[in-house]
Amino acid sequence: MNFDFKHLMAEATRLTRAGNLRAATAAIQAALGRGRGPVAPSSTHETSGVIDVEARQVPEPPPPGIFDDAPAAYDPVPVPGRFIAGSFSDAAGRRDYKLYVPPEAGQRPLPLVVMLHGCTQNPDDFAAGTGMNEAALAQGFFVLYPAQSRRANPQACWSWFKHSHQKRDRGEPALLAGMTRAVMAQYAIDPQRVYVAGLSAGGAMAAILGEAYPDLYAAVGVHSGLAAGVASDLPAALMAMKSGGVLAGSAASGMPTIVFHGDADATVHASNGEQVIAASVGDTTTVEIQHVNANGARASTRRLHRSADGRVLAEHWTVHGAPHAWAGGSAKGSYTDARGPDASAEMLRFFFEHPRLPAH
């Protein structure tokens, strides 16, 4: 049968409204599969069909605002330091997490990078693929990997496209901000150097967190993701993923943001990266264009968005020929493209160039 995207999307919407989520999910998978086309090779662990789908929220009734358990030691990778597991609860629910604690923890306040995985991933997978624990060992910072609950979304997608999870003090943004603050309270974290980054659905949620909590996060990294508020329901999410969405507001957030997006991404259209930058800095910056092609990595176009006084407010990396995958990642994790450039290194450089200014 030759169903086109619009027909399948309409059918998915009808089935969702009717409460038949299983059939709706199948229709969504078919709709997105029609438009994927050939994808450049990436990690051998990559699987097809990562989809940001709507799922019924199952209430999880933990006591509010606490760590449920003392973190337990867990070390699945041979990186010095500690990689510990725990969970956090508040009124919005409960989520597990993994936390990388570097060897020098406690000697002085260190930065914290919050890493939000994509659909079908988990903290261990995301840590392995991005190599962020190894970078944290070398440079001295904490890494927090929240885990999306399969009860909240069967494919472990963050709920970036639901209106109830897009604002401050609501839903998953409130829970993730609360988890971040709880880690900051337990460890010696530099409050001016707390950052958030993510891939795909995790990148979209990172953009939401940066816009909703500029008093908590100093800068944001969005890899293959979408801008905050471009979709508030399932049909709009599908359209945004296919061709870009519509920004919810005209005012720029001013949040320092670095974007990576492959121009061969068949899951989240590359125009979404442009919208993430527009939501951050608007159209008032001057743009410096650089062409990057070094060390055998994929060719990239890097756009630096500068303020009137010359400060870099945002960076937009378009990676030519790259699929829906973390640039420069390791094949030890899913959805990685080892050819680079190194998104982890470039995001960390950008982050540490942008500490949050203390409130006056």
Image (spheres, rainbow, N blue to C red):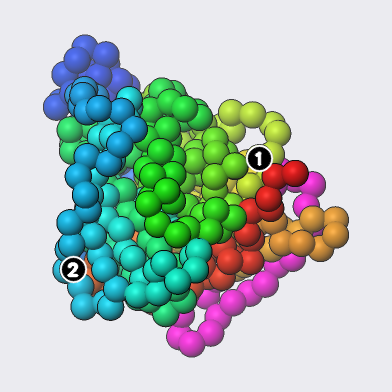
Q: Residue at x 64, y 53 (%)?
A: 356
The residue furthest bottom is 295
Question: Who is closer to the viewer here, 144 or 33?
Answer: 144
Q: Secondary structure at mark 2?
A: loop
> What is the x, y in percent for residue 313?
69, 56
Mark before the other along the chain sequence, 2 or 1: 2
**Type of the residue with mark 1:** Ser
Disc 1: which residue: 253
Q: Residue at x 16, y 19 (%)?
A: 20
Asked if the magenta segment contains residue 289, the reply would be yes
Question: Who is closer to the viewer here, 313 or 246?
Answer: 313
Asked if the magenta segment contains residue 204, the reply would be no
In this image, 164 relative to 34: left or right? right
Which image quadrant: the N terminus?
top left
Magenta span of residues? 281-300
Q: Judge the density around disc 2: few (<14), some (14-19), many (≥20) Cα neighbours within 10 Å.
A: some
In this image, 264 relative to 336: left or right? right
Q: Residue at x 43, y 26 (%)?
A: 170
> What is the x, y in percent for residue 221?
51, 55
The residue furthest front is 107
Whether residue 204 is visible, yes or no, is no
Disc 2: which residue: 75
> What is the x, y in percent for residue 318?
54, 62
